[in-house]
Amino acid sequence: MYTSAEIISVGTELLLGDIVNTDTAYLARELAALGIPCYHQSVVGDNPARLRDSLSLALSRADLVLLTGGLGPTCDDLTKETAAALMGKTLVLHERSYDRIRVVLEKRGLPETDNQKKQAMLPPDAVVFDNDYGTAPGFAMEDPENGKTMILMPGPPRELEPLFAERVRPYLAKKTAHDGKNDTIYSLNIGLYGIGEAAVEAVLRDRMESGSNPTVAPYCGEGEVRLRITARGEDEDSCRRLCLSVAEEIRGVSCEPWRPGTLDDYIYGIDCDSLGAALVGILREKGLHISCAESCTGGYVAKRITDIPGASEVFDGAFVTYAEKTKVAFVGVKEETLSACSVYSEEVAREMAHGCRSAVGADIGIGITGIAGVDDLVRIYHGKEETLPAGTVFIAVTDGTRTECTRMELSPGRRAPLEAREYIRRRASSQAMWMAVKMGK
Amino acid sequence: MYTSAEIISVGTELLLGDIVNTDTAYLARELAALGIPCYHQSVVGDNPARLRDSLSLALSRADLVLLTGGLGPTCDDLTKETAAALMGKTLVLHERSYDRIRVVLEKRGLPETDNQKKQAMLPPDAVVFDNDYGTAPGFAMEDPENGKTMILMPGPPRELEPLFAERVRPYLAKKTAHDGKNDTIYSLNIGLYGIGEAAVEAVLRDRMESGSNPTVAPYCGEGEVRLRITARGEDEDSCRRLCLSVAEEIRGVSCEPWRPGTLDDYIYGIDCDSLGAALVGILREKGLHISCAESCTGGYVAKRITDIPGASEVFDGAFVTYAEKTKVAFVGVKEETLSACSVYSEEVAREMAHGCRSAVGADIGIGITGIAGVDDLVRIYHGKEETLPAGTVFIAVTDGTRTECTRMELSPGRRAPLEAREYIRRRASSQAMWMAVKMGK
C-alpha cells in the first residue's frame, strides 16, 4: 500500500495557461477512488533541472509519483530521461513498444525516425503500459529498496484517460490490495437532480465517513450531484454487486429535514453519464418519443438530447421558437394567450409543450419560455402589471393527458452576463429534462 | 519587475479531483500577458504545515507568489494566517472590508458572525483588492527587504477572475512598468477559423518571437485559433491603438505556403468572444435575420446563436429536423430528393437551408445533415451505393440567391464515442456559423 501519492504534470502549455490541467483532476479522482491519499499536485516545464528538483521533492514526500506529459517524440522532451536518471534506471529499446509505434507510423504513412525510436526507449525492468491511443507508451519504474514508484504517462487527455483506466488502474489496484486479494476496483455513478451537494452530504455523512468498502463520494455540478460508489473486491462482478447493493441502500435514505422524501426521489440514473443519457434511456425502454419547443433555452434541450447516441430512436425533431411569431406559426401558441398572459407565462409554456408534441407526433412534449438575460422584465398578466426577475423561466412537460408545469427563478448570483445566461439556460434545460425523466419513468 | 512568479492553489476539492483547476490556467495566461515568467504551479490542501512548506519553497524560487483559495469563512481556512506568518505580518481588522462584508450579509439576510469577521482580518500594510463578487477580499503582502510579494485571492473562478482583471492586473501592471511609465496592460483577441494553430504560428513566428510591444500569443480551440495581442502603454487608449495597428498588420500576413490567402481570410472577429458573437454582431450590423434546420447537430447551432445576448434581434426561430419526416414536414425537403440522393447529401442540406429560411422569413438559412455517430453509413446516391465515413457532414448556407455548400469529413481520431460525437457536432456547427459569417459580411 502506498502511504501517499503526488501528481506532476510536465508542459510549457500548462505553465502558459494555454490549456487547463484536466489530467491532474482526472488522476486525483482516480487516486481518491483507489484510497491513495494525495497531498500535492504540481506543474513544471520541460526544463530538466527544474523537473529534477520537482521530482526529487515529490519522491521525498510521497512513495508514488504520477507524471503526465513530456513523452513526445521531440528532443525537447526530456521528462523520461530525467525521471529515469533519478530512479537510477537506464533506457534501452523496448521492442514491443517500438513495433507498436511502427504500426501506427505505417498506418499514418509517416517515415520512421530516431525521434520515434526515442519514444520506445524504456528502463529494462519497467512495467510497460501499452498505449492504444497514441505512440508514447506509459510505464512504471519501481525502486523496491526505497519503496518508491514512479509512473509516467502521456499528457493528451484522450491518451491518458483510457491508458490509465485500462492499464494503470488495474496495476495500482493490485499493488494496493491487501494480501494480494481484492485487487479489483470498480466504480458506479449515481446521478441526482434537484438536491444540493450539502443536503446529500448531510444525509449520507455517516456512510461517506465510514470509509468502508464500498466508499461513497459526492461530486457536484450545476443543480446536479453525482455520487461515486467505489468498491474493491476480487473481480468486477462482485465489486459491481457490492456497488449496486449500496446504491439500493442509498435510494432509501431519508432526506429529512433538508429536503422532502428519500434520495430515490432525486435519482435520475444509476451508471449513466448525464441527465440526457438518463432521459434517452428511459424513453427507449418505454418506446416513447419526445419533442420540445424552446424559447429562452434556444435549442439547448434538443442539443443535449441529441448528444446521446441512439437519440434518433426517441427524438424526431423539435422547434426553437424564439420570437412570438414562431411560437404561433410552429407550435400553435394562441395570439389570445400571448396577449392575455404575456409570452413569459405558464400558459404559453403549456401551449408550446402541447403544440410541439402534436406537430411532431411525439408522446412527450416540452415547452420552455422565460428570461435568460440579466434584466428584469415587466409582464402584463391578465391585465395586471408584474415584474419578473431575470432568470424567471416557465417549463411545461406534457404526455397529452398529464401536464406538469414549473416556474423557476434562477438567480445567477454575481456571474458575468454571458455566464449568467449560460447558467440560466443550462439549469432550465436540466429542469425540463428532469421533469421529462419523471414523466417517462 | 518580477524575475518569476509561482501560482499556488489551496483546496482539498482540487486534491480530490472534485473540481478542475481553471484558476491556475487563468492566472498563468495573465502572467504570460504581463510578461512575468512562471516556472511552477502547485496545489496543496488546507493543512497548515504542508501549506507553509509549499509557500516557503515558492518564495525561495520566485519573487511573486499568487495564491488562490482557502479564504473562506470557516475555521478550516488557515491559508491567510499561514501566509501572513511566513511574510512576518500580523492580521488586524480591516474596517472597509468588514463594512463591505456586512452589506453583503445584510442583503442576504444572514447574521454577522465571528467567521465573517475573520474574512476581514488583513495585515495592516496590505494592499487590499476589494471583492465585488464575494465576501473575502484579495490582498497583496509586500516584503520590500527581501523583494518578495505574495498575493492572496479567493478561489471561486467567478470571484477570482473579475477581481484579478479589475484590481490585481492593474496593480501588477504598475509594478512591472519600467520607470513608472507604461503601467497599463491591455489585450485584444482575434478569432480565426479554418486555419490550424501550427500554420498560424508558422506565419507569425517572427512577430511572436520578437517579444516586442505588443506581444502576440496564439491559443487554440477545436478548429479555431485565438490570437491574443497584449500591449503595454501609458493608458488604455494608446494600448488599444497599438493592439489595433498590430491587428491590421496581422490581417495582411500571407498564409502561403501553409494555406491560401492572407490571415484576414480566416478572421471571424476582432475583440469578440466567439464565432456566435461574431455572427450575431455581423447580422445585427446588417439588419439580417438567420434561421437553421439542423439534423446531426440537433440544435447546437441554434443554441450557440442564442448564447449571445441580443440574439433575438437576428434570430426568430429554427428547426431541429432529426428524422426524415420532420425534414419533409417542417422545412419542405422533397421526398424525391430523399430517395434520389439519400438524407446524407448536399441536395438535402440545400433544401433544408432554403426551407427554414422561407418558413421563418429569415434572410439567411442554414441546413446541416450528416453522420455524428461513430459508424460509417452507406448511402444510395443517384442509384449508386457509396460508403460515407462517420463524421461526414453536409452544410448549406443560403441567402436566397447565393447558396454555399460544404462537405466535411470530420475525423474524431481515437476519441471515445461520446467525445467523438461532441467533436463532430461542434466542428460542424462551427463550420456552419463560419459560412454564415462569410455570407453576412
Image (spheres, coloured by chain):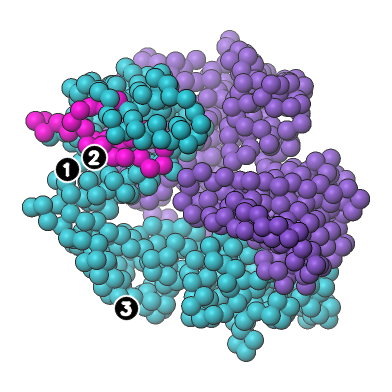
Chain colours: A cyan, B purple
What residue occupies the far bottom of the structure in this picture?
A: A401
Query: Is A327 rendered above or below residue A143?
Result: below
**At x 38% / y 54%, what residue is drawn?**
B113
Query: Is B304 rendered above or below residue B188?
Result: below
Residue B137 position in % (x across, y down): 47, 40
Residue B166 position in % (x across, y down): 59, 35
| Badge 1 amino acid | Tyr
Which is nearer the N-term, disc 1 or disc 3? 1
User: Which residue carries the number 2 mark?
Assistant: A5
Which portion, as a residue range, is magenta? A121-146
User: Which residue carries the number 3 mark?
Assistant: A252
With A403 as the anchor, is A142 left or right in this view? Answer: left
- Confirm whether circles 2 and 3 share one chain: yes
Give the secondary structure at mark 3: loop
**At x 80% / y 41%, what residue is drawn?**
B438
Give the secondary structure at mark 1: loop
| Badge 2 amino acid | Ala
Q: Is residue A123 magenta?
A: yes
User: Which residue carries the number 1 mark?
Assistant: A2
Q: CA distance from mark 1 to mark 3?
A: 35 Å
| Residue B16 in view here | no
Residue B298 position in % (x across, y down): 65, 61
Q: CA distance from mark 2 to mark 3?
A: 36 Å
| Badge 3 amino acid | Gly
